[in-house]
Image (spheres, rainbow, N blue to C red):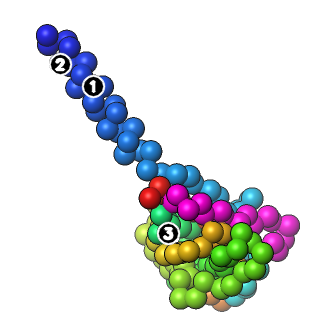
Amino acid sequence: MKKARSLISVLAIFILSALVFSEVYSKKEVLSTAVTLNASTTVVNGAGGVTWYDVTLPSSVSPIIGVTMTFTRAAGSDSTVQAFFQVSFDAGTTWSDLEGQELSVATNHVVISGTTVRVTEMLAVYGVNRLRVKHFINNDGANNVTALQLTVTLERR
C-alpha cells in the first residue's frame, strides 16, 4: 500500500510539473549570430551579414511575450543598449514600428558573469502575428558591446 501511494505521489508530481513546463510554447533566438555594437552606433536589421529572424506569433500564444537581451559590456561601461521592434498584423506583408515598447538596458545592469549582462522584459503585442527587430543602438560613446543576442519567449494562452 505504501509503495502504491508513493508511486501515485511521484506520478502526480510528474504530471503537474509537465503541465507547468508545457506553458512555454517556444524560445527563439532573433539573431542568427551574436551582434557587435561599436561605440555610439546604430545597427539596422540585416546589417553585417547577420540574419535577423521574424518571430511568428500564433493565435494560440499569449500577447504578452518575454524578450531577453544578453550582451558583453566593457568593464566600467555606464550607458544603455536599446532594441527597437517592428510588428506585422498581416503575416509580414507590411510592418510598423512598435511604439513605446523598446527594450532599453543599462550596461551597468546586474551582471550574470564577468561582464555579461542579461535582462528579460515583457512586451505587449496584442493582435500582432509577427515581430522583428528594427535596430539596436549603443549609446556608449567610448565602449563597444559584443556578443549581443536577443531571445523571444512565447507562452500558450
The x and y percentages for residue 3 are: 19, 12
Q: CA distance from mark 3 to mark 2?
A: 41 Å
Question: Which residue corresponds to mark 1?
Answer: 10
The x and y percentages for residue 86 are: 66, 79
Q: Secondary structure at mark 1?
A: helix
* 36 left or right, relative to 57: right
Q: Residue drawn at (65%, 85%), measured in percent from left and top?
A: 97
Q: Quadrant of residue 50?
A: bottom right
Q: Main secondary structure of the magenta part?
A: loop
Q: Quadrant of the N terminus?
A: top left
Circle 3: residue type? Pro
Q: Residues within 10 Å of mark 2 (few under 14, many from 20)?
A: few
Q: Residue drawn at (71%, 69%), measured in percent from left and top?
A: 91
Q: CA distance from mark 2 to mark 1?
A: 9 Å
Q: Secondary structure at mark 3?
A: loop
* 71 left or right, relative to 43: left
Q: Residue drawn at (63%, 69%), measured in percent from left and top?
A: 129
The answer to which of 27 and 129 lies nearer the viewer is 129
The x and y percentages for residue 60 are: 52, 58
First-in-chain label (3 vs 1): 1
Question: Which residue corresponds to mark 2?
Answer: 5
Question: Which residue corresponds to mark 3?
Answer: 63
Q: Secondary structure at mark 2?
A: helix
Circle 1: residue type? Val
Q: Which residues are magenta?
A: 46-61
The answer to which of 9 and 134 lies nearer the viewer is 9
Q: Residue drawn at (81%, 72%), measured in percent from left and top?
A: 46
Q: Residues within 10 Å of mark 1 (few under 14, many from 20)?
A: few
